[in-house]
Structure formats: structure tokens, C-alpha cells
Image (tube, rainbow, N blue to C red):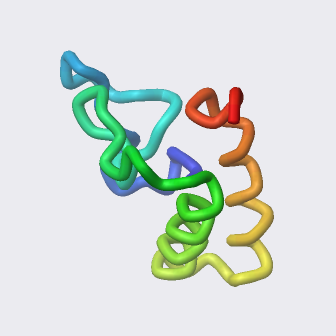
Amino acid sequence: MPLKKDPNGGGTDVDGSRSDMYCSYCYEYGTFKQPNWTVDQMQEFVKGKLKEMGFPGFLAGPFSKGIRKLERWKNN
């Protein structure tokens, strides 16, 4: 999810500071909210959230493709 569009400005690290890597829908106080999700499950979740926020479907898909490049899934 583009952090600029995150209504909370991003997730939070362990100390409560804003994460510049993960959004508030998936990351809170240094922990992933859905720790067992696959990258495909997260992509579908993000597409849905982007559509809820008014993004057209043709943009939601390309935005969610970047999820595979996040640190969380680099080694998978």
C-alpha cells in the first residue's frame, strides 16, 4: 500500500514510531498483523484496500505487485 495513502501514515515499529516500510493495515508495534499470510494473500488484501480507498482496479494490481519486493518476502 502506498504509505502516502495510508490513513494512519504507516504502520508502527516496536517503539511506536512510524514505519517507513509497512502500512498500518499489516504492521503494528513491530509485528505483522497477518504473520502467516503468503505474498499472494497480502497482494489480494492490498488490492481490496486500494479499491476501498477509491483506486481503480487497473491501478490496484500494479501497486500490489511491489509487495513481493518488500523485505518481508525477499527470501521466499
Closer to the camera in the image, 60 or 40: 40
Closer to the camera in the image, 76 or 67: 76
From the viewer's perspective, tell me whether residue 9 is left or right of residue 42. Answer: left
From the viewer's perspective, tell me whether residue 11 is left or right of residue 21. Answer: left
Quadrant location, the N terminus: bottom right
Q: Position of residue 9 (x, y in %)?
A: 38, 43
Q: Which residue is found at the position 79% from the left and 63% from the top?
A: 62
Q: Position of residue 26 (x, y in %)?
A: 39, 49
Q: Position of residue 48 (x, y in %)?
A: 53, 77
Q: Which residue is found at the position 38% from the left and 44% from the top?
A: 35
Q: Which residue is found at the position 47% from the left and 81% from the top?
A: 52
Closer to the camera in the image, 67 or 63: 67
40 to 60, vertically: above or below = above
Count the numbered circles shown: 0
Q: Position of residue 42 (x, y in %)?
A: 54, 59
46 to 4, vertically: above or below = below
Residue 19 figure quarter: top left
Quadrant location, the C terminus: top right
Q: Which residue is found at the position 79% from the left and 80% from the top?
A: 58
User: Hey, which residue is sitting farthest top in the picture?
Assistant: 15
From the viewer's perspective, tell me whether residue 26 is left or right of residue 33. Answer: right
